[in-house]
Image (spheres, grey):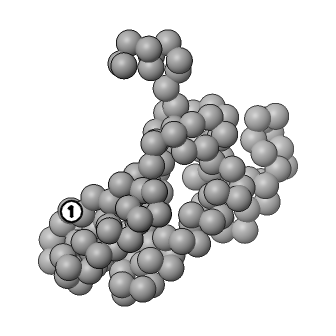
Amino acid sequence: MQLFKYIPDWVDKFPVESERHGLLSVAMRKGSLAQPREMNFVLAKFTSSEYAEEAAYQVAQNGWKGKVDPDADDPEFMTVIATKDQYSITEETFIDDLQYFYRIAKLYDAVYDGWFASVPMRKKQADWLV
């Protein structure tokens, strides 16, 4: 059911319920999904800092900034947060990136732990930050 005209049809039909709810939340609270914003994907439960660093390097090779931190829930593990500025959430990019981060997590026996997006900056705000 399409409640708001700025929520694309693909979001309403997205097959993974938790991802669909996140997309709906971003669209309803933070404006058009296509509007560029900072996007972050989280990979958790890396068993070694070496694996986490390798994963961060791989995501950097794919145009993301990878940051390695101790896992918030269990400091024996490591977490990688992959960040991209000026990310437009479209059906193709979101599905491609979601699948990519699931593959990276599986490759390193880690866990895909979700995503979060920032509020897009308005042009007026961007001007004074530059």
What residue do we see at 38% from left, 12% from top? 128
Identify the residue shown where x is 49% and y is 33%.
119
> Left or right of 55: which side holds 17?
right
Crowd rating for badge 1 (residues with CA inside 10 Å; few <14, some 14–19, many 20+): some
Is 65 positioned to the left or the right of 41 in the image?
Answer: left
Task: Tell me where residue 39 appears, x and y as whole percent.
Answer: 48, 48
Q: Secondary structure at mark 1?
A: strand
Q: Residue 21 or 114: which is nearer the viewer? A: 114
Who is closer to the viewer here, 64 or 6?
64
> Which residue is most to the front?
61
Q: Tell me: residue 80, above or below residue 54.
A: above
As drawn, is 16 to the left or to the right of 129? right
Q: Position of residue 16 (x, y in %)?
A: 66, 68
Residue 91 position within the rendered picture, expressed as x and y whole percent measured from the top left: 72, 55
Picture layout, residue 124 above or below residue 113 = above
Q: Residue at x 27, y 58 (%)?
A: 67
Q: What residue lies at 45% left-to-right and 49% top-to-bottom?
A: 84
Q: Quadrant of residue 42?
A: bottom left
| Residue type marked 1 | Asp
In the depicted structure, whether residue 121 falls above or below residue 40: above
Q: Can the viewer see residue 29 in this picture?
A: no
Q: Residue furthest left?
A: 76
Comparing 113 with 85, the one in front is 85
Percent across and percent down for residue 51 are: 26, 80
Label 1, on which residue?
69
Res 97 visible: yes
Would residue 45 appear left or right of 75 to someone viewing this image? right
Q: Quadrant of the C terminus?
A: top left
Residue 59 lies in quadrant: bottom left
**Number of callouts:** 1
Above or below residue 10? Residue 71 is below
